[in-house]
Amino acid sequence: MTKETVLIIGANGQIGLELAESLRNIYGQDHVISADLKTIDQPGVIYERLDVLDKDRMYAIIKKYNVTQVYLLAALLSATAEQKPKSAWNLNMEGLFNVLDAAKEGIIKKVYWPSSIAVFGPTTPRVNTPQYTVMEPNTIYGISKQAGERFCEYYFQKYNVDVRSIRYPGLIGWKSAPGGGTTDYAVHIYHEALKNKSYECFLSEQTELPMMYMHDALKATISLMDAPAEKVKIRSSYNIAGMSFTPKQIAEEIKKHIPDFTISYKTDFRQAIADSWPASIDDTYANKDWGWKPDFDLVKMTDDMLKNLK
Ligand code: VAH
């Protein structure tokens, strides 16, 4: 049986850096290729420069390493996408088509593509948002993720492409920096709490959003990719939930560790994005189909984040 070789496109991003490390621990460092616009000099890491819009270069890398699986993480996130709509649509969609077509042509066997709770919009029920519901996203990022989900399911149904996807909540971790997201305040707040004992939040204090510790996001991603194909009954994208909290609640949790920490609020354009998203997610299908459940809540995450950032 051919040894699995994984190509991670967008390997320098918030998820990519940590996912690459986890996948190297599983497949071995010679069977995980990190690819991004820029390479990083990391001992033991095979790096290739790649713009996912350069299909020929992507095919050349797949051929060079006998890649069997592609994790496509390259995208412009919600806040950046609102500022660069055309580039965001082009990267988020054409990048996905390039990878789905490689699978359709049998050049790779399996694809992972991240969706987001951003696929839901202001008319979606906000509390315990179900897997199947009204989805009228009103952000470029959310529209691209909704369209991407439709194409993932289409390529599975029409061409039998084994593509798997998760609707990530806001992700929080200490090993890699987020970029261009609306939920990124929940990462910056920990750094600022340790550095300045204060943080000015760009979302209002009552803005409740679905969030997840990176440990759990990686666990969900790898569990879904490892699941037998017949258990992956949803080929658009799975809801998964970790926790939900407001800026006020995460600040209160940080204060238990740093009593004189203070938070202030100065909302910007990202408030409207956050207001269009759910407050909490129902992940019954992920639990039923492939046994998903999170390990971290806000208390455990805050303890782990501050311990590792110190
Ligand atoms: C963003 N972190 O803020 C991403 C994520 C649910 C949010 O998709 O755009």
Image: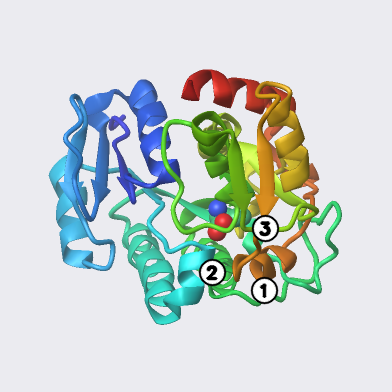
Q: Position of residue 81 (x, y in %)?
A: 47, 71
Q: Residue at x 28, y 62 (%)?
A: 52
Is residue 254 at least partly visible in the picture? yes
Q: Where is 305 relative to 37, above or below?
A: above
Q: Is residue 268 left or right of residue 161?
A: right
> Which amino acid type corresponds to the residue marked 2 in the rendered image?
Tyr
Residue 148 lies, in percent from the top left, at: 52, 67
Q: Is residue 285 above or below residue 217?
A: below
In the picture, measured across the screen, residue 224 lies left or right of residue 76, that is: right
Image coordinates for residue 209, horizontal then vertical, percent: 73, 51
Quarter assignment of residue 106:
bottom left
Q: Amino acid at mark 1?
A: Pro
Residue at horizontal 18%, vertical 25%? 43
Give whichever of discs 2 and 3 has the lower sequence position: 2
Q: Image check: 228 left or right of 38?
A: right
Q: CA distance from mark 1 to mark 2?
A: 9 Å
Mark 2 against mark 3, which lies toward the viewer?
3
Q: Can you identify the residue that label 2 sits on?
A: 141
Q: Which residue is mark 1?
A: 137
Q: Confirm if mark 2 falls within 8 A of ligand 1.
A: yes
Q: Secondary structure at mark 2?
A: helix
Is any atom of residue 166 visible in this view?
no
